[in-house]
Image (cartoon, rainbow, N blue to C red):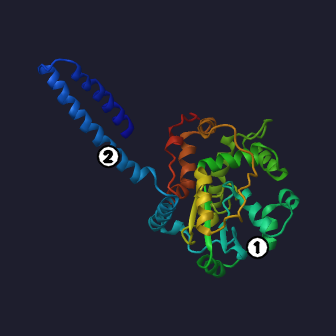
Amino acid sequence: MGVSCIILASRKLKRRLKCQLFALNISNVQACIGGIFATITVVICFLNFELIRNQFGERSAADINRWRLDHLANACKRWNNGGHTNLQPAFYLHSKNHSLVYCLVFKAGTSSWFYNFNSWAGYSEYEIMHIDNLYLARKFYPKENRLTLMQSMQHSFSFIIVRHPFERLMSAFEDRLASRKNAYYSRVAQAIYRRYHPLGQGTVSFRDFVQYILDDVRHNNGTIALDIHWCPINNLCTPCLARYDFIIKLETYQQDVAAMIEAAKLQGIVRLAQINHVRKEPVRTLAAKYFSQITRAQMDKLYSIYEMDFELFGYSAETYFQIPKALV
């Protein structure tokens, strides 16, 4: 808005200044006066643009992180600590050598950080790339009990990586079920397909996947039993009961990680390895492809399952609701 204002006013100014080439009659005097007002407009627009840019457009990574932490704290108050009364320690890794505590949110950059933690543990490149990462990590970084973990977080730098809940869901579907790369999840995908297409032959769809999640939550009367790759972050990391120094968002991963490394004084220690493949299709394309398969009723129920994650980390589902849905 500020830039366009400047351009428009400057164009007016150029036109007004042409008045100097003509005799000074009444209309030309008016044009020159208009030129003066145009000049003033340019100055005002520029000052307003600078004010807006300085206030909102150039926030430091530290300011953004502080906003995220404050937002989390306020959301936790509104949502009764996410409905949890005890910290869940199962998915935290604590590197005592680096005074670093990290909570694992699967499908949100875990492969890269498993690589770092397991490298620090002394595992070889071959072991890291061919053996289950959580299994390796737990051999070197044993799970701490709730009290010990809380104390560790008080005396270490702690962080979490989060992701838009529906982007994370699409990634889980593609990587775990649709790709058939993993033998266990290939069997899960087949079981899901057979549940909803007992007489058919084909592959699991995103709609099947969503209905499977809805049925699981209804059957278990909650989300706690969902697979770790699509279980809500609120259940994996109980963020309202933890103490974080930094919240990294996958959507702004590179700048967030760079700022976190500086804040934690991990320069030269963390390797920003790209382990998983980079998705070729834009998120908008994938969202239209997948969320057009489900009905509005399914969408409403799905959102209610991940609503806490949306609220705690400041995400919106509006664009997903706008995608035309299946009628039945």
Residue at image point 75% right, 63% down: 116
Residue at image point 58% right, 44% down: 298
Mark on residue 141? 1
The part of the image, by quadrant, that contains residue 281 is top right
Residue 232 in view, yes or no:
no
Between the C-alphas of marks 1 and 2, the distance is: 54 Å
Q: Position of residue 77 (x, y in %)?
A: 45, 68
Mark 1 belongs to which amino acid? Tyr
174 lies left or right of 42: right
Depicted 218 relative to depicted 236: above or below:
above
Q: Residues within 10 Å of mark 1 (few under 14, many from 20)?
A: some
Q: Residues within 10 Å of mark 2 (few under 14, many from 20)?
A: few
In the image shown, does 254 or 41 lie closer to the viewer? 41
Mark 1 or mark 2: name the one nearer the start of the chain. Answer: 2
Residue 104 in view, yes or no:
yes
Number of marks in the image?
Answer: 2
Q: Extreme left residue here?
A: 26
Dot 2: element: helix
Depicted 99 relative to depicted 1: above or below:
below
Q: Position of residue 43 (x, y in %)?
A: 29, 41
Q: Position of residue 286 (x, y in %)?
A: 63, 38
Residue at image point 82% right, 72% down: 139
Q: Please identify, in this view, whether the residue under mark 1 or under mark 2 is nearer the observer.
A: 2
Mark 2 belongs to which amino acid? Leu
Depicted 277 relative to depicted 228: above or below:
above
Mark on residue 86? none
Dot 1: element: loop
Q: Which residue is mark 2?
A: 47
